[in-house]
């Protein structure tokens, strides 16, 4: 969520005349959830069956059919795709290719500390 808020506020917000990016953040989370749960079957209004990765696109199409601009929702999908790639795809590629930096989105230590997941780094003496 912190990644999405930061990217949308600093990089997208100044160039898109949008005062509230809550819908974009929702679309980002729906996109990531859909990609992480590829086998979940869903249906739209009980008429149109699809799997979870298509949920943000179905929601986008429905929003456009209701007369809304697709820009805000598309921003969320784009930021969600960026997060999904950096968090789940890039580390696998980096590991396969033997790159030194394997994870780009490491939360700050203060966030680990606040959430109780902080593990101090100990130097080993050989």
Image (spheres, rainbow, N blue to C red):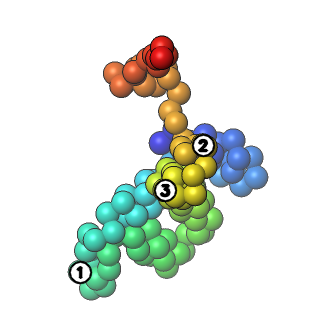
The mark lying in front, picked from 2 and 1, is 2
Residue 66 appearing in the image: no
Residue on which the image places disc 3: 92
User: Count the marks: how many?
Assistant: 3
Q: Is residue 72 left or right of residue 48?
A: right
Residue 46's tag is: 1
Q: Within 10 Å of the Cα at label 1, are there few (<14), some (14-19), or many (20+) other Cα atoms?
A: few
Q: Residue at x 58, y 69 (%)?
A: 70
Between the C-alphas of marks 3 and 1, the distance is 37 Å
Residue 101's tag is: 2
Between the C-alphas of marks 3 and 2, the distance is 11 Å
Q: Is residue 96 left or right of residue 69?
A: left
The reply to whether the C-beta atoms of the residues labelled 2 and 1 are less than 8 Å apart is: no
Q: Residue at x 71, y 55 (%)?
A: 16
Q: Residue at x 25, y 74 (%)?
A: 41
Between the C-alphas of marks 2 and 1, the distance is 45 Å
**In the rendering, at what x and y percent does residue 91 appear?**
51, 51
Q: Residue at x 39, y 70 (%)?
A: 53
Which comes sooner in the sequence, label 3 or label 2? 3
Check the image and report above or below for 61 versus 89.
below
């Amino acid at each position: 969520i912190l990644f999405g808020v930061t990217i949308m506020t600093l990089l997208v917000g100044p160039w898109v005349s949008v005062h509230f990016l809550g819908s974009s953040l929702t679309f980002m989370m729906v996109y990531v959830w859909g990609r992480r749960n590829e086998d979940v079957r869903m249906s739209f209004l009980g008429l149109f069956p699809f799997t979870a990765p298509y949920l943000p696109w179905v929601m986008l199409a429905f929003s456009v059919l209701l007369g809304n601009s697709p820009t805000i929702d598309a921003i969320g999908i784009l930021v969600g795709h960026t997060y999904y790639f950096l968090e789940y795809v890039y580390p696998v590629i980096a590991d396969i290719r033997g790159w030194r930096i394997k994870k780009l989105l490491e939360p700050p230590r203060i966030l680990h500390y606040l959430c109780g997941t902080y593990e101090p780094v100990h130097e080993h003496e050989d």
